[in-house]
Image (spheres, rainbow, N blue to C red):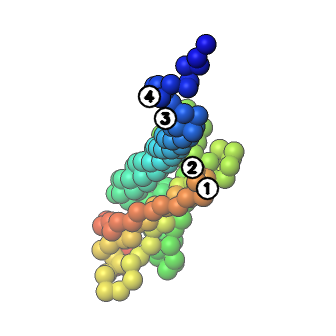
Amino acid sequence: MTKRNDHPGTRGFSLIEVMVSMTMLVVGLMALASAASTTSLLRKRNLQEDLVFQGLVDRLEWVRGELFADTPFYDNVQAALVAGGSYQQAFRLDTDGDGVQDLSFVAGDQATPILNVTVEAPAAPADPGDVLVVQVGASWYGVGGDRTNSISSLVANRSGYGD
């Protein structure tokens, strides 16, 4: 009786070839899983940054409207500016209106406001009676740790408090 493996030219894979191909397959699958995980984290981070940026823009537009209306915010800003200082106020970021802040200031803290508005007179050469500097900033705990973002704008001062 002859053994089949003793015949030259038989077909098949050696154990080494199978192990090399399995190793290549495992490395490829691990790279794919890592890429999917990274993509998911980047997506969450971008979603949070978009949410914050929209909150910053909304709050900046709100401030622009408040500075042209007779509101307590307007009165507080003008009183602080006449005294030579700046006015600051903190706000919560609740874009969906459910009463719960959408992001946390620190891990698990949904109560501390993360949006901060500062209104001040600009440095020279602008006339502080004509224009105000409004800065809206946010600090929050997000994907990847603590994050900070801010926007600022010049806004016309309707009162001309310097006059």
Q: Position of residue 54 (x, y in %)?
A: 40, 48
Q: Give the Cα separation between the discs numbered 1 and 4.
A: 61 Å
- The mark nearer the N terminus, 3 or 1, is 3
Q: Position of residue 126 (x, y in %)?
A: 31, 81
- The mark nearer the N terminus, 2 or 4, is 4
Q: Position of residue 128 (x, y in %)?
A: 36, 78
Q: Give the Cα separation between the discs numbered 2 and 4.
A: 58 Å
Type of residue at label 2? Val
Q: Residues within 10 Å of mark 2 (few under 14, many from 20)?
A: some
- Residue 9 is labelled as 4
Q: Is residue 118 left or right of residue 130?
A: right
Q: Give the Cα separation between the discs numbered 3 and 1.
A: 23 Å
Q: Which residue does the numbered mark 1 point to in the structure image? A: 145
- The mark nearer the N terminus, 1 or 4, is 4
The image quadrant where one finds the N terminus is top right
Q: Which residue does the numbered mark 3 point to in the structure image? A: 96
Type of residue at label 4? Gly
